[in-house]
Amino acid sequence: MNDSAETHTPSPPRLLVFDMDDVMLRYDVDARRAAMAGMAGLTVADVERLIWTSGIEDASDTGELTPEAYVTAIGEALGVPFGREDWLRTRALAMTLDMEMVNLVAALRERVAIALLTNNGFIMREHFDVLVPGLRELFGPAMHVAAEFGGKKPAPAIYKGVAALYGVAPEEAVMIDDKIANVEGALAAGLRAHCFTGIGELKRFLRGLSI
């Protein structure tokens, strides 16, 4: 599955697009939920139900909720005051940058354009510099949340939007994501794609792209 699109476009790609959570960094969503639960005297399962299962997180990711509406909705669901600083604190403690991946992508950007695409809302875009300054240094302005494109992965239109933004055809771009559904969405959009399971497999895939 990882390499299924390689044979259709033998030339090297012009754009590599990387997911953020669980690709460029290790994301501990349970730690985030536990911190939120502690604020409200709830269980982690309660928080998952109230924020994730309820659709609040999805509504932010797709751009349906502004940052202000998003944190307000979380506070109302938890039954406690919840603002941007609370979001930043609980999000940050769940994120650990993968320096091995950072070093790999730093080397790759010498040979091919790179971008980041994460299923997150506008609040993440506003706080990339605070949460992941190391990724900002690496990717510069080429850091995007799916909400910018009016939806979220795995919708094929999201990937086509990113490719168009960088002036490349879908088949000239590659998506690297840890979720198989997102890989399938990229393939459906005409990109090549790799399901990330570790840096070793990624390096093998990239060698097959001649980069």
Image (tube, helix red, strand yellow):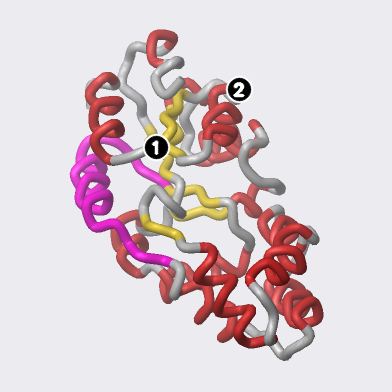
Where does label 2 land, which residue? 188
Q: Quadrant of residue 84?
A: bottom right
Span highlighted in magenta in the image: 95-115
Q: Where is residue 98 shown, x and y percent of the image?
A: 29, 57
Establish if 177 lies above or below 12.
Answer: below
Which of 46/170 is in front?
A: 46
Residue 196 — which label?
1
Q: In the picture provided, is 27 more to the left or to the right than 162?
A: left
Q: In the picture provided, is 42 more to the left or to the right than 28?
A: right
Q: Give the residue type that dot 1 points to.
A: Phe
Establish if 112 lies above or below 50.
Answer: above
Q: Nearer the viewer, mark 1 or mark 2?
A: 1
Q: Where is residue 176 shown, x and y percent of the image?
A: 42, 37
Residue 54 — which label?
none
Q: Secondary structure at mark 2?
A: helix
Q: Where is residue 79 shown, x and y percent of the image?
A: 79, 85
Q: Name the residue at 35% across, 54% down.
A: 139
Q: Where is residue 5 shown, x and y percent of the image?
A: 45, 16
Establish if 202 lies above or below 36.
Answer: above
Residue at far top of view = 7
Q: Give the residue type that dot 2 points to.
A: Ala
Establish if 158 lies above or below 144.
Answer: above
